[in-house]
Image (cartoon, helix red, strand yellow):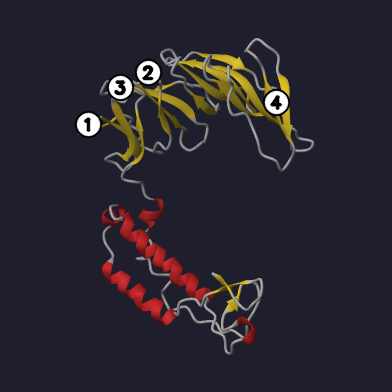
Amino acid sequence: MTLSACGTMRCMPPLLDVSTMWPRMQALTKVFPEAPKENWARSKLSAAKISIAALAAAANVAHHRRSSHRDANCGGTRSLGRSCGRVSMQAVPHGLTTDSRIIPRDILFGNPEYASPSLSPDAQLLAYLKPSDTGVLNVWVRTVGATDDRQVTNDGYRGIRFYTWAEDSETLLYLQDSGGDENFHVWGINAVTAGSVAKDLTPYKGVKAQNLSTNKRYPNTIFVGMNKRNPQLFDMYRVDLQTAEATLDTENPGDVLGWHIEDETFTIRGAAASNPVDSSQIIRVRDSSDDEWRELTTFPYGEEGGLVSFSK
């Protein structure tokens, strides 16, 4: 966009004429013909090209304006934010936005071939998400530099969308609910031993787990937020990876929305609370888990900020 005689307004160049766009769309559909769903899933780039071209054509047609005469003050261009003459709308060619071949459903809602690769802390294993033989997204692993890929988890219904490595370099942690109830639990499974069975590390009915945190200095312990004590509040618990024993570490007083964990001691030392009166954000800190909380600063409504780290 460049400055024109429209003054301080920037003027838009003329849009592409639909008479030139539509033949291009027809050519694209010849280059990328309709294919079985499994081929579409393996050809996301081709489908993406068709999708982008289709959306561009639709936007071009919907907004195409042709001036019946040009305003001398606009130098033959249409200014952004004002009209430079009478306009006429071009009709959308029949079938342009209804052709099912443009964007197949599997491209929009289907599973990826591979997703979310993650190295184990010791860099020996590569984990990633991939559909199982039944088409459900699960966690797979392979040895770095090898092709010994194998499926680790065995979810057959909902699919797994989030996982992470525990710091022991053997345990994979992932979130899964039951039948879509959205009460996600933290599950752990040994990724080194083939045939391992997943263990529910937060096995409490009606309880949701979130704010999962690990620390390399404490490889057998994780922090998990759970609304176990009060369904409306998430307290922070220390959970043992081997026994799944959960110990209440920090209780939510009722207004805390997020926690900050100090890295060296794996201690919760920061909290972000919300003031319901004026919607400001209050930052609280403490020196250790045995000390009282104190307010560090407050961010008024409309301002953004938060804790970054503790120096010690």
- Name the residue at 47% across, 78% down: 92
- Among numbered discs 4 and 1, the one appearing first in the sequence: 1
Residue at the spot 64% in from the left edge and 79% down from the top edge: 83
Q: Residues within 10 Å of mark 4 (few under 14, many from 20)?
A: few
Q: Please tell me which of labels 4 and 3 falls first in the chain.
A: 3
Of circles 2 and 3, which is in front? Answer: 2
Q: Residue furthest left?
A: 147
The residue lying toward the viewer, choosing from 238 and 17, is 17
Q: What is the three-letter code of the residue carrying label 1?
A: Gly
| First in sequence: mark 2 vs mark 3 | 2
Marking on residue 168: 2
Q: Are marks 4 and 3 in contact (CB under 8 Å)?
A: no
The residue that label 4 is drawn on is 254
Mark linked to residue 145: 1
Question: Helix or strand or loop: what does disc 2 sit on?
Answer: loop
Instruction: Give the image quarter of residue 54.
Output: bottom left
Q: Is residue 136 left or right of residue 175?
A: left
* Category of crowding for the residue at label 1, using alpha-carbon neighbours closer than 10 angstroms: few (below 14), some (14–19), many (at least 20): few
Amino acid type at circle 3 is: Ser
Q: Residues within 10 Å of mark 3 (few under 14, many from 20)?
A: few
Q: Is residue 290 above or below residue 285?
A: above
The percent position of residue 167, horizontal first and vertical second, equals 40, 20
Q: Position of residue 188 (x, y in %)?
A: 40, 23
Task: Determine which residue is flagged by label 3.
Answer: 196
